[in-house]
Amino acid sequence: MSGHSKWATIKHKKGAIDAKRGKLFTKVIKELTVAARMGGGDPSGNPRLRKAIDLAKGAAMPNDTISRAVKRGTGEIEGAAYEEVLYEGTGPMGTLFLVEGMTDNRNRTVAEIRKIFEKNNGVLGGASTAGWAFDRKGVVLLLKESATEDQLMEIAIGAGAEDYSLEGDEWSIVTTVDSLQSVLDALEKAKLAVKSSGIQFLPKNKKPVSGREAEVALNLAEALDDHDDVQNVYSDFDISDEEMQRIAGV
């Protein structure tokens, strides 16, 4: 989401992030299962599964839990059959939202997502409601101290990255979907520690929001993110650092 780092910071300050460890585990388990179903259970030949396993280990998920999720995906053991879904909607001040999810019951999930939008001054729309306003990109995050700007210019851009920027205490590198892995390989070869990476929807243009609209947009994003079937939430709203501090009460 636009301003994702700021959003993550606000969640930390409000104490809302990973007191929800169980919810995080649920989301990672679904990603492990779907990644294994789509690309097989061998992480060496399945980049999506390899990334999901790294995410699971980063969340301190037990190895047997990881193994069971992968085996459910490959069909070695029985389990829920998850499918990927994408919802599009609008929020306050015409802000646009994309919601990636995984569910074993489409009808239940879409009804619950619609209710979340309605409770937070939003509307769940149909296909092409919001997707036109986003680009699908690779995103790599590094801690500020992990690399210099000269290193990013030489290594990341040299490997095919489109751009990089400093967001708070993190470097954010943007790539095409196809060049993400080559950029990650170049960073690894240069021994530059990557905090996280993945494919995301990035807004083509950002909508500044403030005051009550900013609070409502954040509440909608958080309510969607809290749903067990939601994997990622993206939006085009942008909130200034000053507004974030006001909302956080700091």
Image: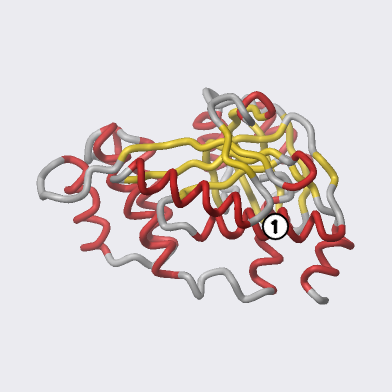
Where, quadrant-wise, is the C terminus in this rendering?
bottom right
- Where's residue 2, x and y in %? 72, 44
Q: Residue at x 78, y 32 (%)?
A: 205
Where, quadrant-wise, is the N terminus in this rendering?
top right
Is residue 85 depicted above or below 230 in this figure? above
- Amino acid bearing label 1: Leu
Element class at badge 1: helix
> Could one spot residue 11 in this view of the protein?
yes
- Where's residue 48, x and y in %? 38, 38
> Could one spot residue 159 in this view of the protein?
no
Q: Dot 1 surroundings within 10 Å: few (below 14), some, or many (20 or more)? A: many
Q: Nearer the viewer, residue 68 or 126?
A: 126
Q: Nearer the viewer, residue 27 or 65?
A: 27
Q: Residue at x 24, y 62 (%)?
A: 65
- Where's residue 40, x and y in %? 23, 35
Instruction: Find disc 1 in the rendering and name its residue.
Output: 218
